[in-house]
Image (cartoon, helix red, strand yellow):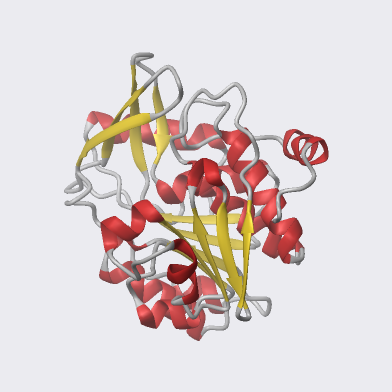
Amino acid sequence: MNAPDRVDIVVYGTVALDRFSPSGRELPGGEALNTACLLAGWGVSVALVGTAIGRDPEGVRLRDLIEATGLSRAFIPDDPDAVTPVCDIVVSPNGERTMSGRGFAQAIAPPVPEALFTSRPIRPIVAVDPNLGLQATQTALAAAQAGCPLIAMDFAHQPDVVAVAEVLQCSLESLRRFGGPTGEPEEIVAALPARTALLTLGAEGGIVQTQGRITRYRAYPLTDVCDTTGAGDAFRAGLCYSRLQNWPLERTLYFASATAACHCRRLGGASQVPLEEIHDLMAKNPVIIF
C-alpha cells in the first residue's frame, strides 16, 4: 500500500504478531500499531513507522493482517534478516492478560522519519514510545525540533524528551520498567515538567498535571470486558485524536478514557472502535473529573 498523501499523525514504534490463548487467534499488535489502527478507523490520515518485518512465517502472516486494517506499510521496512516480533498473550476470563514474546530484543528499528515532519506546512502530531531505544529517543527529539506536537508515551525516564513533549503519558507499570520519578502518584506527576503530564492508574483512572495544576480523573467503568491488551495504546490514540480536534483538557480526558474502556470490550490491541460507541459511553457517564 502506498504512503498517504496527507499525514495528520505519525506513530513511531513497534509492530508485532500477537497470538492469543486460549482462543488461538492471531492478530496484529505492538504499541505503535495498536494506536495507529484506532486512528485509521476514525478516518485519520496516519503514518505508521514500525519495526522491520522478516520473511519468516510470522512476518508473512503479519503483513496480511496489517493490510486488513487499512494501514499503509509504506514506512514499515521489509528486511530478510529481521526476526518478526511475536507476542504470546494468555487472556484470563476477567480480561487480564500475561504476555511473553520473542524477537523484541532483536527488533530492527525503522529510520527516524524526519522528512515526514517537515515536508508539509502543517506539522503532524507525532506519537512515540521508548521501546526502540536510541532511535525512538532521536525520533521524539527530531519531531519536537521540527515543531511537531509531541505525544510521548512512557518517556518519564528521559528528561530531554519530557522537556519537549506537549503531552507525556506514562503508567506505574512503565515507571517500574523504564525508571523515572518515584513516590506517591501526585508526587510523580508533579516531578514531570512536560506541558501536560498524565499518570494512568488503570481502573482507578489517573492524574494529570498541566501548568502546575494537578487533577484526578476517574476511569470509565469497564463492562463486558474481553481483553485489556493495549488499553494504554488506546488511551494514547484518544489523546492524539483529541489534539487533532484541538479539544480542551476535560473533553480530551473524557474521550481518551472512554476509548480505552470501549477498546477493552474486544480481543487484541489493534481494535477499531467506532466513534459512535465512544461518544455513547461518554454521554451515559459524563462526569469523570474530581
Spot occupied by residue 64 in the image (x, y as percentages of width and height): 42, 31
Name the quadrant containing residue 130.
Answer: bottom left
Residue lying farthest front? Answer: 184
Residue lying farthest top? Answer: 23
| In the image: residue 227, left or right of residue 135 | right
Is 222 or 61 nearer to us in this picture?
Answer: 222
Question: How many numbered badges does the structure rendering display?
Answer: 0
Q: Say which residue appears at 65% left-offset and 35% top-offset.
A: 273
Tell me if residue 60 can be seen: yes
| In the image: residue 218, left or right of residue 108 | right
Q: Say which residue appears at 29% left-offset and 36% top-offset.
A: 59
Tell me if residue 272 can be seen: no
Is 222 or 33 nearer to us in this picture?
Answer: 222
Q: Quadrant of the C terminus?
A: bottom right
Up-down: is 151 above or below 265? below
Up-down: is 215 above or below 104? below
Residue lying farthest right? Answer: 283
| In the image: residue 92, left or right of residue 235 | left
Q: Say which residue appears at 46% left-offset and 46% top-offset.
A: 33
Spot occupied by residue 177 in the image (x, y as percentages of width and height): 27, 56
Spot occupied by residue 231 in the image (x, y as percentages of width and height): 50, 41
Spot occupied by residue 287 in the image (x, y as percentages of width and height): 77, 47
Up-down: is 5 above or below 266? below
Residue lying farthest bottom? Answer: 145
